[in-house]
Image: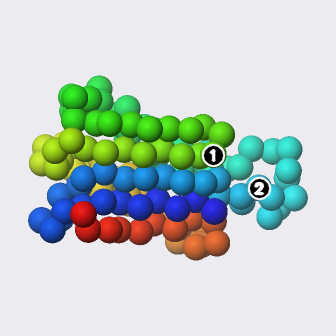
């Protein structure tokens, strides 16, 4: 299962997020040798958002990343809360996509949680 925890402060400003684990959806369908379409979709949403934050909104200086491709781990911390409107839209869009995937595939494979920090 993939778990994504989104961190916001008490003003509901984004402070970061962590993405952990592999969805395991392909195993359910007995396609052990096939790529996991759910994992691919999650990775695409998360990585595209990070790339867009760095290249389109110039948030690169505000982002600290830690990743491990084997375990499906991506941790993104924002040095300062995200206040740029374009950056907020990108993060909201990522969460919309993840929420839609959760509705389609269920909590067994993807969970999106929020924590106040």
Query: Badge 1, how many Cα within 10 Å: few under 14, some, many 20+?
Result: few
Query: Badge 2, how many Cα within 10 Å: few under 14, some, many 20+?
Result: some
Earlier in the chain: of badge 2 and badge 1, it is 2
Quarter of the figure with residue 114:
bottom left
Report how far apart the C-alphas of labels 2 and 1 lie in the structure: 16 Å
* Residue 100 image position (x, y, % from top left): 48, 64
Residue 46 visible (yes or no) = yes
Badge count: 2
- Give the vertical position of 87 relative to 104 (above or below): above
Q: Residue at x 31, y 51 (%)?
A: 16
Q: Residue at x 24, y 53 (%)?
A: 15
Helix, strand or loop at mark 2: helix
Where is the N terminus found, in terms of image quarters?
A: bottom right
- Give the vertical position of 64 relative to 55 (above or below): below
* Dot in front, 2 or 1: 1
Residue nearer the viewer, 34 or 3: 3
Q: Which residue is mark 1?
A: 71
Q: Which residue is mark 2?
A: 26
* Residue 68 image position (x, y, % from top left): 56, 38
* Residue 116 image position (x, y, % from top left): 26, 68
Residue nearer the viewer, 95 or 64: 64
- Give the vertical position of 65 relative to 117 (above or below): above
Residue 44 visible (yes or no) = no
Q: State yes or no: discs 2 and 1 in contact (Cβ < 8 Å).
A: no
Helix, strand or loop at mark 1: loop
Quarter of the figure with residue 47:
top left
* Residue 104 image position (x, y, % from top left): 58, 68
């Amino acid at each position: 299962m993939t778990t994504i925890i989104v961190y916001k402060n008490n003003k509901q400003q984004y402070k970061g997020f962590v993405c952990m684990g592999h969805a395991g959806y392909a195993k359910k369908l007995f396609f052990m040798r096939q790529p996991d379409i759910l994992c691919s979709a999650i990775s695409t949403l998360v990585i595209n958002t990070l790339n867009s934050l760095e290249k389109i909104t110039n948030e690169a200086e505000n982002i600290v990343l830690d990743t491990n491709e084997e375990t499906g781990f991506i941790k993104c911390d924002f040095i300062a809360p995200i206040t740029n409107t374009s950056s907020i839209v990108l993060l909201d869009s990522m969460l919309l996509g993840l929420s839609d995937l959760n509705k389609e595939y269920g909590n067994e494979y993807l969970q999106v949680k929020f924590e106040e920090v």
